[in-house]
Image (cartoon, rainbow, N blue to C red):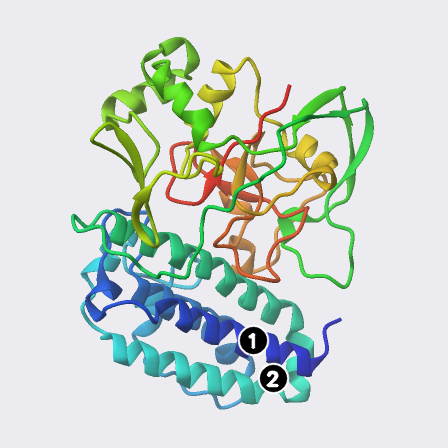
Amino acid sequence: MIETENLVSLFLETRKHTEAICKPLEIEDYVVQPIVDVSPPKWHLGHTTWFFEEFILKPHKPGYTLFHEDFAFVFNSYYESVGKRVVRSDRGNLSRPGVAKVYDYRHYVTAELEAFLKTEKASELTEVLLIGIHHEKQHQELLMTDIKYILGHNPLLPPYSSSFSENPIEKAPAAWISMEEGIYEIGHDTANEFCYDNELGVHKVYLQPYSISSKLVTNKDYIDFIASEGYKDPLLWHAEAWDWLQQEKITQPMYWHSIDGEWCQYTLKGLQKLEKEAPITHISYFEAFAYAQWKGCRLPTEFEWEAAQHNFNWGSRWEWTESAYLPYPGYTKAPGAIGEYNGKFMVNQKVLRGGSVATPKKHTRPTYRNFFQTNLRWQFTGIRLAK
């Protein structure tokens, strides 16, 4: 079990990093919500603070005084059992509380929790404290991708930071990694390392022989797909995906712009020429599946990915898999509101594995199961082929 001193350090480091992510923002950037999936940065700052207040300080710290009695209504996300909340689509309508007040809230709760972590009672709450810390790390990645969406859909395409590099290039040539048929162990089995409940339950799966690419699909690869009119071929797409293409008029990856016959990409450094050797990103499951079909390949299952992951580099893109997001054998939800964290989303979602350039340090591992709906692509999502 993690020692109290290390827990305090991890907590404070996490809280500081969230605020560092917001440092390049203009005050007006904090409130923008272009679409329902993208939350205003101000809301992320408040929500990650509310989580610690609601699940740790409020029920467990003797004599704790709420910072503001209405903040639970403003910053609750989807915890139905905790109480009423602002509708998700209305988060961008909250001009109040102001940014300064939200930072006051953060600093108040951080100080209160830091003091509480040094008490004997806090040692009994290590598990929920770690969930809170890693919950905030999840929101750090969401902050990065939401900020990119906000700025990347501003007509001026303003840069966020000149130092954030989001397109690392894999220099080694692509190769097929052959995996033998057999029984493989899947799931998290390290007792002293944090994981989410959806990773628990080490179990065996039987896999047929398969091959998986050592390298992610690149922008150059994907240009060939576009040039061959892959977006216009209904035989490559699921029926639901084809409807999505027509309705949303999708013809290329998110953040791609064709300027004077040349592909450019909006990055957090601003609009740049497309780096053709960089891995494709901001791709929906629909697009990943269609590309795999076009190549005469398929996407790996999450079990194939986990069994093979030690053979290739991963972590620059969340990688779509062919697996539905379902519970592992023996999965049980935690009691109370914490049980709403993962289990209630195990329907109509696909699993992604790996991590991305926006995933915080100390937050990913081979067993991590990310999940999103099939049409979403504002995260740093990419493609690894299998056959």
The answer to which of 314 and 236 lies nearer the viewer is 314
Q: Is residue 236 left or right of residue 6?
A: left
Residue at (26% x, 53% y) in the render: 150
Given the image, on which type of amino acid does mark 1 rest? Answer: Phe
Number of callouts: 2
Q: Is residue 175 left or right of residue 371?
A: right
Q: Give above or below for 125 relative to 296.
A: below
Residue at (63% x, 40% y) in the render: 327
Structural crowding at the residue carrying mark 2, measured as other residues with C-alpha within 10 Å and reported as few (<14), some (14–19) or many (≥20): many
Q: Position of residue 363 (x, y in %)?
A: 59, 59
Residue 117, numbered circle: 2
Given the image, on which type of amino acid does mark 2 rest? Answer: Leu
Callout 2 secondary element: helix
Visible in this render: residue 50? no
Q: Position of residue 201 (x, y in %)?
A: 74, 45
Q: Name the outermost residue toward the right.
A: 182
Q: Give above or below for 125 relative to 165.
A: below
Q: Position of residue 271 (x, y in %)?
A: 28, 47
Callout 1 secondary element: helix
Could you tell which of marks 1 and 2 lies nearer the N-terminus?
Answer: 1
Quadrant the N terminus occupies: bottom right
Asked if disc 1 and disc 2 are in contact, CB closer than 8 Å, the reply is yes
Quadrant the C terminus occupies: top right
Residue at (49% x, 65% y) in the render: 136
Residue 11, numbered circle: 1
Structural crowding at the residue carrying mark 1, measured as other residues with C-alpha within 10 Å and reported as few (<14), some (14–19) or many (≥20): many
Q: Give above or below for 238 relative to 354.
A: above
Image quarter of residue 187: top right
